[in-house]
Amino acid sequence: MAGGRREFLKGAGCALGVLSFAGATSAAAAAPVAMSPNGRPLAGVFPIGWTPCKADNTFDPHAMVRQQQFLNRGKVAGMAWPQNASGWQSLSASEWNAGAEALASVKGNTALVLGVQTSGFNVANSQSYARKAKSLNADAIISLVPGSGNDADIVSYFKALSDASGLPMIVQATGNVSVNTLVVLADAVPTIIAVKDEAGDPLERAPSLLQRTGGKLEDFSGGGGMTFFPELELGFLGTCPYTGLADVLQECFNAYQAGRKRDAYDIFGRFLAFNTLPHANEYVMKARGVFAEDAVMRANPATVQAGAGNRQRGGLITDAQKTEIRAALDTYLKPFLVA
């Protein structure tokens, strides 16, 4: 990518207020905010999109469009698809392309980050997805780290993705990916601007990761956003939760960066309380009218229920539980539901 990291590692004087980290307790400086080629800040809440399907498990591009429009209305910073929560391993190439095109068709101001890893981390196939992301005017790409190979092999893989797209990249670290490997990657591939860290405890790894990369690598996490507030205290610049309450977490992020930490803490507490309800995360997109009541979500093959072609996340849900979820949204979260 011409100009390397300097082209999109810029201070973002934007409504997110992401340059202010006076409350961070980490000794390491927070990363400057990376900007996409489309001028969108790559910081804040970037949920991992679901892959909604009809009751017969056929991919539903119209539901994908509604999901993206929901995030646009919610003024959510970005969206990443497809990753683990999207069931990326279950997607055919035609489904990947249909989903990416559906999201790009209604992208709005929510940055679009496309997941480009493919089965077996085939370099040529992943490069094809990366080129497609570029052609769709995506804001960035994301890939899991290959599960085998040494640091040199991993660097080679991400360099190939960079060569194919030239877009900013987010690395998703899982399993035994070390901080040292991430540092090596950040040094070797200038287009890498952030890590979604799910390898070990991201709260424990953050100080070393931020310090050893000189504050040039943004730190995101996953885990459904359940530790987002303490992550903000350490200088994290984003999180990758599920989509259902992404607008609520974005409000938390905005409040924190504006210096309203007590408000951010309160919003985060409401988010956590809601997620203690049985099936809340699995049903919230239906409760909010984005997905149909009979929609099912794709899952990676290892998590698919025996004898089924898809997984209805959370198993059986009762009518009483649906009513409780809707009541909680209306009673406790309504002021924070932007979408």
Image (cartoon, grey):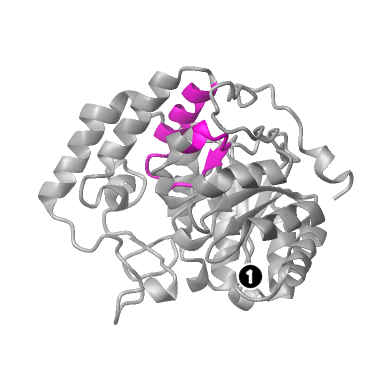
Above or below, 257 against 50 in this view is above
**Identity of the residue drawn at 75% across and 57% down:** 184
The magenta span reads 231-257
Instruction: Determine whether 227 is above or below 232 in the image.
Output: below
Residue at left offset 31%, top offset 77%: 308
Q: Is residue 111 above or below residue 55?
A: above
Quadrant including the C terminus: top left
Confirm whether the magenta stretch covers residue 33.
Answer: no
Callout 1: SS: loop
Q: Position of residue 241 (x, y in %)?
A: 45, 47
Residue 130 percent coordinates (x, y): 71, 61
* Whether residue 106 is visible: no
Q: Residue at x 26, y 37 (%)?
A: 273
Q: Look at the picture and state if 12 lies above or below 153.
A: above
Of residue 103 and residue 127, the one placed in the foreground of this image is 127
Q: In this rendered view, identify the residue nearer to me: 181 or 140.
A: 181
Q: Is residue 236 magenta?
A: yes
Q: Residue furthest right?
A: 2
Relative horizontal placement of residue 167, taking residue 320 as reference (left or right): right
**Label 1 belongs to which residue?**
146
Instruction: Give, as a three-letter code, the residue at label 1.
Output: Pro
Please indicate, yes or no, whether residue 232 appears anywhere in the rendered image.
Answer: yes
- Residue at (15% x, 43% y) in the render: 323
